[in-house]
Amino acid sequence: MKKPILVIACLFCCAPLLAQIKTKAKPKPAARLAAVDGKGIYEKYCLTCHQGDGGGVPNMNPPLIKTSYVLGDKTRLIKVVLNGFSENVDIDGESYSNVMPSHDFLKDQEIAAVLTYVRKNFTNKAGPITTAQVKAVRATNKKKI
Ligand code: HEC
């Protein structure tokens, strides 16, 4: 006679557990966040000068294809985007007359995404730039001003 009561009691006990299993199946909040689109940022902020294929414009805007800036020191590369570039120095043997404005209005993760896109496209095969690296460079960058 006591058995049905036990079964019912057990069902009550298990209900919260079952509910938990259900919530666990939901995608985690991080996975639902839209990934920052490096290509989209490139097309919006960099393409007009550096062109869709990263080839640049002769004597005006340098290419982003295997240059020492793109493939070299990550801090220097991040600073180009944060501070802009108007040094009029030779970039791998050429000089460019145009001035690149500062893009420090972009978020750390946007700069990381666009530079990762540049370093992995246009026949470049360099490792990614992380949001943490951009954050660190931005922090030291501010101190100097
Ligand atoms: C208004 C045009 C313009 C825009 C927009 C622009 N750049 Fe530049 N960029 C230049 C010019 C011009 C130079 C070289 C400046 C010099 O030689 O004084 C340069 C230099 C660079 C360099 C270092 C040199 C090289 O060729 O490797 C990198 C890297 C770079 N830009 C990346 C970017 C990225 C990424 C964006 C978008 C977030 C961007 N630029 C937006 C014009 C631009």
Image: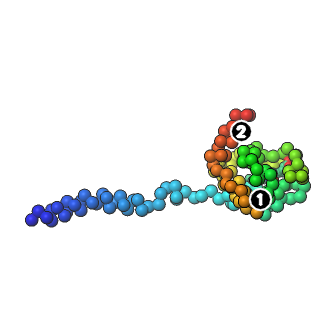
Q: Residue at x 76, y 63 (%)?
A: 123
Mark 2 residue's CB less than 8 Å from ligand 1: no
63 to 104, vertically: above or below: below
Q: Is disc 1 surrounded by few (<14), some (14 to 19) or many (20+) residues within 10 Å?
A: some
Q: Residue at x 80, y 51 (%)?
A: 68
From the viewer's side, name the closer residue of 70 and 6: 70
First in residue order: circle 1 vs circle 2: 1
Residue 84 can be seen in this image: yes
Task: Farthest residue to the left: give it.
Answer: 1
- Amino acid type at mark 2: Asn
| Count of marks overlaid on the render | 2
Residue 142 place in picture, x, y as percent: 70, 37
Q: Secondary structure at mark 1?
A: helix
Q: Secondary structure at mark 2?
A: helix
Asked which quadrant contains residue 51, the reply is bottom right
Residue 98 can be seen in this image: no
Asked which quadrant contains residue 126, the reply is bottom right
Residue 44 place in picture, x, y as percent: 72, 58
CB within 8 Å, label 1 to label 2:
no
Q: Is disc 2 surrounded by few (<14), some (14 to 19) or many (20+) residues within 10 Å?
A: some
- Amino acid type at mark 1: Leu
Residue 15 place in picture, x, y as percent: 28, 60
Quick check: 31 left or right of 67? left
138 to 48, vertically: above or below: above
Per the rendering, the mark at residue 141 is 2
Asked which quadrant contains residue 16, the reply is bottom left
Query: Is the C terminus in the top left, top right, bottom left or bottom right quadrant?
Result: top right
For mark 1, what is the residue? 47
Residue 135 place in picture, x, y as percent: 64, 44
Which mark is nearer the camera, 1 or 2? 2
Quick check: 104 left or right of 62? left
